[in-house]
Image (tube, coloured by chain):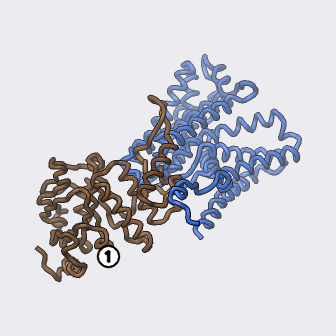
């Protein structure tokens, strides 16, 4: 029985269930949930309110930056400077407040620093055609060095008149949920909304899918690319501000090596380094898996030296699902 | 007359790519543009599409002189080009590609969001009009060559193009898909659109075109109704075995 053209056009390629089962983020989420269930039974300390509070709060710093990183990765770029930008923004905030300025000024200066760095990265990459890897690798070095210059490589732990406000901002909680977790959820919803429901979100995917096509179609490709690097740096700056409030002290080595965790989180969550694929929800799920792995190793009494092995394996495994699906499709 | 080219030339340094070409093209026609590699077909089409500016000569659209600096300006005049590599985003759905840069939105003021439903529906209607079995929700990555052409062509229809320039649309696709693409071209013509078809494939041009323009070494050597010529003659004109006028 031949189907009519109408039926063919109206048919969906995959059912909703099929789409979910073929989704990397879904399987990583399943892994996170299974790991949590397993840990609840295997250890006494995992499913305690205190540990869950810690896990959710620890997730946020990587997760917030992974949101920004996901945008960059969707356009086919990479931002290696986020760990150092986090450090510089924390330090700028700390030094400004230590000098006697209020928390509003501190945050404004810190956010401005992040945006300037992001714009610098973005303009070099978009308008001057530098490879993202090179520019952000350079910035990784520059930003950390500037943080050392700003603080004279000391630890800052006194934040002037608004000291307590800053600590409440990062260390407080509302209804038993740590403040950073609330910020993370708000930022994730915002990122998810932009990606799915706005034109700029659609264009970010288009640039990653086929940049030449995006240019030929007349999309504002270069401004959007600058924008995503600014958002990436901004996400690092926001994470830095929150982390400063939570830690109550800033050293020049915070955020060292964090870029790799952030990229791993984005990739585990389904972002494709070749560009064109990724979601805000995936960034959170990827960050959650990394944190659950870290937390569980400690609780299970496995040496912390194994952490890298497990996180690295999780990254490779997550992408393996994607490869297997591609092989099936190409057959 | 929809599009008139008068004494158009283009040189790149010492190389004369297009030499003194005049053409008058009407709406609702399919014009086959043929010639060997390097004959200047692509250069000519790229001038119409706004990629290059002519070194000499003028272009008139509906009787008005136009000067195109960029492809986006050509599009504003209703001139669309379907590239050989199609310029589609593989990671997006057919509907997303059709509406890329012209997304439909709903809501008011700054709170406007993409209207997925309307875009799926409208893209579906266009595919139906084109009689193409292309599903708006499918990712372009998973599509056949013919379906990709349908997406690229649907895009020109969204924009209400008056002129569609097609660069080798039937190269590198299967025989069944070629028939599909030729069918799409007729659909465009029947809607009163001028289709300029660059092709190396003689049978395709003779099947679908109303007129054939042959170029050799940057010059126009023939411009005839398809009924008054033959593949043999056109081959001769392309190779230079027959001297054109």
- Give coordinates of residue A37: x percent, y percent: 82, 46
* x then y, percent, for residue A276: 52, 52
Is any part of residue A144 visible from this angle?
no
Give the letter of the chain under mark 1.
Answer: B
* Residue at the extreme top of the image, as rendered: A161
| Residue lying at 88% horizontally and 45% vertically, measured from the top left | A41
Q: Quadrant of residue B19?
A: bottom left
Relative to A206, is A63 above or below?
above
**How far from the left and from the top, in percent, is residue B206?**
28, 73
Q: Which chain is represented by blue in the image? A: A
- Identify which residue, A155 or A40, lies in the foreground: A40
Q: Which residue is mark 1?
A: B203
Residue at 60% of width from left, 63% of height from top?
A326
Colour chain B is painted in: brown
Q: From the viewer's perspective, is residue B200 above or below residue A105? A: below
- Does residue B159 sit above or below A239 in this rendering? below
Viewer-proximal residue among B109 and A40: B109
Image coordinates of residue A65 in percent, x first then y, are 59, 40
Q: Quadrant of the C terminus of chain B?
A: bottom left
Q: Residues within 10 Å of mark 1 (few under 14, many from 20)?
A: few
The secondary element bearing badge 1 is classed as helix
Q: Residue at x 74, y 51 (%)?
A: A31
Q: In the displayed structure, would residue B235 be above or below residue A306?
A: below
């Amino acid at each position: 029985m031949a189907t009519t053209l109408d039926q063919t056009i109206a048919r969906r390629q995959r059912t909703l269930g099929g789409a979910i089962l073929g989704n990397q983020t879904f399987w990583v989420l399943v892994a996170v949930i299974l790991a949590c269930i397993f840990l609840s039974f295997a250890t006494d300390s995992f499913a305690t309110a205190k540990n869950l509070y810690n896990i959710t709060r620890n997730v946020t710093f990587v997760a917030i930056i992974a949101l920004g990183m996901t945008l960059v990765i969707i356009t086919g770029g990479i931002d290696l400077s986020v760990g150092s930008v986090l450090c510089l923004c924390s330090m700028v905030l700390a030094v400004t407040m230590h000098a006697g300025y209020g928390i509003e000024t501190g945050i404004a200066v810190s956010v401005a620093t992040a945006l300037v760095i992001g714009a610098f990265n973005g303009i070099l990459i978009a308008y001057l055609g530098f490879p993202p890897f090179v520019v952000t690798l350079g910035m990784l070095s520059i930003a950390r060095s500037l943080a050392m210059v700003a603080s004279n490589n000391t630890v800052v732990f006194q934040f002037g008149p608004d000291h307590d406000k800053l600590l409440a901002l990062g260390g407080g909680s509302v209804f038993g949920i740590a403040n950073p977790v609330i910020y993370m959820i708000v930022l994730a919803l915002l990122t998810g909304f932009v990606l799915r429901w706005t034109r700029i979100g659609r264009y970010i995917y288009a640039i990653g899918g086929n940049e030449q096509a995006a240019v030929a179609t007349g999309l504002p490709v270069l401004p959007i690319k600058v924008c995503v690097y600014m958002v990436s740096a901004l996400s690092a700056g926001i994470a830095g501000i929150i982390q400063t409030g939570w830690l109550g002290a800033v050293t020049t080595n915070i955020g060292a090596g964090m870029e790799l965790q952030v990229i791993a989180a984005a990739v585990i969550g389904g972002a494709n380094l070749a560009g064109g694929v990724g979601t805000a929800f995936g960034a959170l799920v990827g960050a959650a898996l990394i944190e659950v792995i870290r937390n569980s190793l400690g609780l299970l009494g496995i040496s912390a030296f194994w952490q890298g092995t497990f996180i690295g394996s999780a990254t490779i495994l997550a992408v393996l699902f994607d490869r297997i699906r591609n092989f099936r499709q190409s057959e | 007359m929809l599009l008139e080219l008068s004494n158009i030339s283009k040189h790149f340094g010492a190389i004369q790519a297009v030499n003194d070409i005049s053409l008058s093209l009407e709406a609702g026609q399919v014009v086959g543009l043929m010639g060997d590699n390097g004959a200047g077909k692509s250069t000519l089409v790229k001038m119409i599409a706004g990629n290059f500016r002519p070194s000499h000569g003028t272009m008139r659209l509906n009787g008005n002189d136009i000067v195109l600096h960029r492809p986006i300006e050509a599009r504003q005049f209703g001139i669309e080009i379907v590239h050989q590599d199609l310029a589609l985003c593989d990671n997006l759905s057919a509907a997303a590609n059709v509406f890329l840069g012209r997304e439909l939105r709903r809501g008011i003021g700054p709170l406007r969001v993409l209207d997925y439903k309307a875009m799926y529906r409208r893209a579906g209607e266009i595919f139906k009009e084109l009689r193409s079995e292309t599903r708006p929700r499918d990712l372009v990555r998973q599509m056949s060559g013919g379906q990709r052409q349908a997406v690229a062509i649907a895009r020109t229809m969204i924009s209400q193009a008056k002129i569609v320039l097609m660069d080798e649309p039937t190269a590198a696709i299967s025989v069944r898909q070629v028939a599909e693409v030729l069918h799409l071209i007729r659909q465009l013509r029947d809607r009163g659109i001028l289709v300029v078809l660059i092709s190396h494939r003689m049978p395709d041009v003779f099947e679908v075109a109303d007129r054939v323009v042959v170029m050799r070494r940057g010059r126009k050597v023939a411009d005839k109704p398809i009924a008054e010529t033959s593949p043999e003659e056109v081959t001769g004109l392309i190779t230079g075995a027959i001297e054109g006028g």
